[in-house]
Image (tube, rainbow, N blue to C red):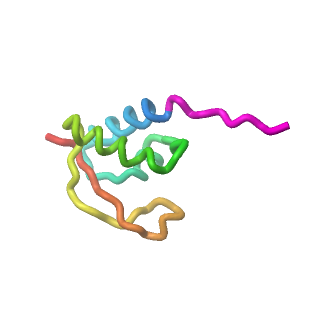
Amino acid sequence: MKAMVLEDLEWDVDARNALERVAMRGQKFQAYDLTELEGLRNPPHANMWGPLFRQAATDGVIRRVGFAESRRPGRKHGLCRVWQVAA
């Protein structure tokens, strides 16, 4: 008998809330800060990060301010975008 995998249907809502809380701190941030500062769990699929940030930028919540090495373990210092609240 195979174990059932439960889909995380709330991740997108939780992620958007965490993103907005981190952005409102007024500091520059990257995706990993949502995990470090807000305890956001990993998404069901790694490709969910991009649409989260893209939509928040389209909605005028955040703006891209540069690039930096990722602090996320396992990224091996790959580049990631740096964001700040859109003011």
Q: Is residue 24 left or right of residue 3?
A: left
Q: Is residue 67 magenta?
A: no
Which secondary structure dominates the residues rendered in magenta? Answer: loop
Q: Look at 29% across and 39% down and name the residue there.
A: 55
Q: Look at 20% across and 56% down and name the residue there.
A: 65
Q: Position of residue 57 (x, y in %)?
A: 24, 42
Name the one closer to the observer, 25 or 19. Answer: 19
Q: Look at 40% across and 63% down and name the residue there.
A: 70
Q: Position of residue 35 (x, y in %)?
A: 47, 47
* Image quadrant in which you'd find residue 8: top right
Q: Residue furthest left?
A: 87
Q: Is residue 16 left or right of residue 4?
A: left
In which quadrant will I find the N terminus?
A: top right
For the magenta stretch, what is the residue range? 1-10
Q: Position of residue 59 (x, y in %)?
A: 22, 35
Q: Is residue 87 left or right of residue 50?
A: left
Q: In the picture shown, does residue 10 fall above or below 52?
A: above
In which quadrant will I find the C terminus?
A: top left
